[in-house]
Image (cartoon, helix red, strand yellow):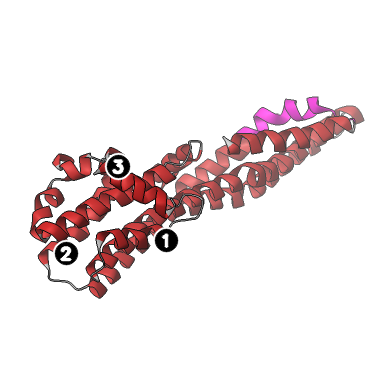
Amino acid sequence: MFIAIGWALALACIFGVFIAHGGNIGVVLKALPFEMTTIFGAAIGAMLATNPPKVMKATVKGLAACFKGSKYTKARYMELLALMYDILQKARKEGLMSIEKDVEDPHSSPLFQKYPGVGNDHHVTEFITDYLRMMVSGNLNAHEIESLMDAEIDTHHHEAFLAVIAVQRLAGGLPAFGIVAAVLGVVNTMGSVGQPPAVLGGMIGSALVGTFLGILLAYAFAEPLAGALESKVDEAGKELQCIKTTLLASMQGYAPQVAIEFGRKVLYSTERPSFVELESYVKAKR
């Protein structure tokens, strides 16, 4: 939503001022299809040559998510922390072995299915159950599990960030491909020397549209998309950090209600539920 608003504002200001100063928008529109084809074709071709299929797939998926609202809301985090509370409370009352069936088959677990928003999220349930399984086995201490969690979160962040890098490279290449389009336009103009000045002026103007479009697409479109995609990656990592902090607090002997408070504290203030909100939600779900 905000991306579309930003794009609309940028285009309105740029082209509005151009027209207000007496600019001939017809020259831009006439050259637009050819210059866009040259610039975008070259940029996408270079992008395909640079990135393996898995990165391209992640990039397309990530860019599509940029136009949707964030799923990492206060309501989702309250659901996540309530799920963690129920799991840890059951383990504390009935022993770690009591959650073994929940860990092995979360999709059939009443605990996970009680919170479908996070319980049906494959990445979240996998991260939770993997480390609960290690806690049940009792072979690793809190420091070893923390180190392993950090390594997994770093790997997840690096893997997701490859899509951001791909879009940043695209943004970096667009001005150069705009220059390529402009140079080709100038070459075409030089081959038409002898034409009337009005014709040559129009050809030169069309050639310069390539440079303009390359810079516009890079800094008004591609760079903002890279920034939005980076924010999405950061949000996903924050959820894993919340789970990590909660589980480690439990392993260090804190009661479930205190452990989820540890997890709540690592959330961003804009999505973090208050202590009272979380406590009321947990009680309502019992």
Residue at 10% across, 60% down: 95
Q: Is residue 23 magenta?
A: yes
Quarter of the rendering containing residue 138: bottom left
What's under tag 3, amino acid-wise? Ala
**Residue that label 1 marks:** 265
Give the extent of the magenta segment.
22-37
What's under tag 2, amino acid-wise? Met
- 79 up-or-down from 157: above or below: above
Secondary structure beneath dot 3 equals helix
**Mark earlier in primary sequence (1, 2):** 2
Task: Tally the numbered discs.
Answer: 3
Circle nearer the viewer, 1 or 2: 1
Q: Nearer the viewer, residue 260 or 140?
A: 260
Q: Is residue 278 left or right of residue 3?
A: left
Evaluate whether residue 101 shows in this view.
Answer: yes
**Residue that label 2 marks:** 135
- 259 up-or-down from 68: above or below: below
**Residue that label 3 marks:** 284
Secondary structure beneath dot 1 equals helix
| Mark 2 to mark 3 CA distance (whole Å) | 28 Å
